Amino acid sequence: MNAVRNDLNVSPSTLAFLDRPKHLLIGGRWMPAASGKTFAVIDPATGREVCQVAEGDKEDIDRAVTAARCAFESGPWPTMTPAERGKLIWRIGDLILGHLEELAEIESLDNGKPLRVARVADVPLAADMFHYMAGWATKRHGATLPISVLYTPGVQYHSYTRPEPVGVVGQIIPWNFPLLMAAWKLAPALTTGCTVVLKVAEETPLSGLRLGEILQEAGLPDGVVNIITGFGETAGAALVAHRDVDKIAFTGSTEVGKLIVKAAAHDLKRVSLELGGKSPNIILKDADLDVAIPGAANAIFFNHGQCCSAGSRLYADASVYDKVVAGVAEQAKKIKLGHGLDPDTQMGPMVSEIQRNRVRGYLEAGEREGARAVTGGKAREGAGYFVEPTVLVDTTPDMQVIREEIFGPVVAAIPFKTLDDELIRQANATVYGLAAGIWTRDLSRAHSLAAKLKAGTVWVNCYNIFDSALPFGGYKQSGWGREMGDAVLDNYTETKAVTIRL
Ligand code: ADP
Ligand code: MG
């Protein structure tokens, strides 16, 4: 055990995990990368190396896809009954809860998020996704369809549909909720009977590896889920390019989403995408400000603003604007930054040096273009990748900080005076369409605004409320398809129509 790990305040089981070799899970076996290469996992609160993981690349992706194909076509997985599959998926949820503390510690150390957040959000929600999806294994069905076939008069047919698994799925996930994103991806793919090659984010590979061990403990047949650690441009790109992958499910930046669509065009792989956002959060003049102000702060500062749904454009009615800005700024000032594993920490560091620099770049661009930070506005000097929670004012619609996703703890507050239509026009004036918030006591107005916002999710008098049963995804450049709910099952299903002449 090295010195860095010695001073980590984590449980013996987490230390034991950190000390195990970090290999790739291919065909039920843990193996080093074909190249033998590894790369460092960094604690973003200190900048220090935690451990090394295998650097998977094209050859490893080839092996993993072969294993996934083999598991899809033969072996126990395709012949397992839906009930057996459902029970197995349920067991995965149970085991995640059984390892809650360890998974929360791993997540906090790897991503930087506060341990207490990982404990109540990331890990239980990941378990819930498996529990929720377990039920669908026995409940997806086709239909019998009465058909007429006008050109064969007098002939009768029996027609029905079969929902079938799409096949071998490549899944690529980001670093903001590493375990939860793995669960959002794996659980529906398993429920529908697909097999998977999962490429976890290079910034946060650890909880995916621990989850791989849990999948084995649950009894998932070999090759059904293969887990590759490695970089996007190499391992990720090889997965997208692979001829024997039927579908890619991706969560990440809109920029990479576009690359994936281009790369998948050569064989018309199915693609689902959950991408960026620049979500408007709207406070009307009749809102209960005691709820709306902390709500607006949480909408942007939760997970350090590293949420695709972050409420990063805060529209407040001009009559309450000053109070809202002062209130959110006060909340921002109170947030205690620190190491995720420190029990007093309310906000950890950005996930990586690159991400810290990216956010700092936006803060500098905002300043250059004339935006003013009421509070925060700087990346912290010293060890770790910390950025101050920031409230910007005096912005204009053409500024980079208004148009682009910052993915950090930076909110721009914007007053509005005019009618609904003007507000809606501004709120919708973005290439994204992931989420939106509305704070008001007037529910009739809330319903009518909710219908006009071009966003996949609208929260009223709340924000960042997620549930396994609720479909989540984007309009416009925020993506294709939906995660969660029964809607996500469509991403992993081919519908076959069978017709029999009687
Ligand atoms: P960020 O830049 O914030 O890390 P990305 O969209 O680049 O967000 O990363 C999300 C996931 O996509 C990660 O797992 C990353 O490795 C992967 N990725 C990045 N570039 C590519 C690519 N060209 N092809 C496939 N996957 C990629
Ligand atoms: Mg990237």
Image (tube, helix red, strand yellow):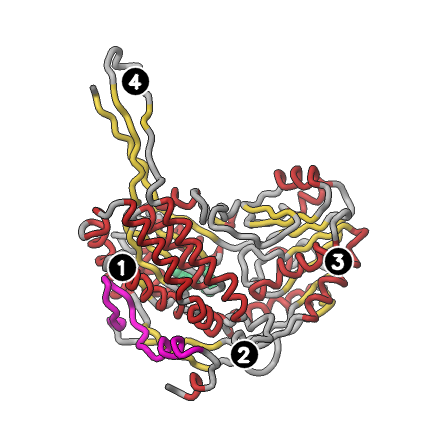
Q: Is 281 in front, or is 108?
A: 108
State the separation of the CA atoms marked 1 and 4. 47 Å
Asked if 294 appears above or below 441 in the picture, the reply is: below
Residue 306: give its label.
none
Evaluate whether residue 368 shows in this view: no
Q: Is residue 45 magenta?
A: no
On the image, the x and y values in percent for residue 191 come to: 34, 48
Whole-number angstrom distance, CA of label 4 to CA of label 2: 68 Å
- Specify which label sits upstream in the sequence, 1 or 4: 4
User: Sequence-wise, which precedes: disc 1 or disc 3?
Assistant: 1
Precedes in sequence: disc 3 or disc 2: 3
State which quarter of the image contains the N terminus: bottom left
Q: Which residue is mark 4?
A: 149
How far is disc 1 from disc 3 in space, using C-alphas? 52 Å
Question: Can you tell which of label 3 and label 4 is closer to the viewer?
Answer: 3
Residues under labels 3 and 4: Cα distance? 63 Å
Q: Residues within 10 Å of mark 1 (few under 14, many from 20)?
A: few
Crowd around label 3: few <14 · some 14–19 · many ≥20 (10 Å): many
> Which residue lies under the disc numbered 1?
219
Which amino acid, mark 2? Answer: Gly
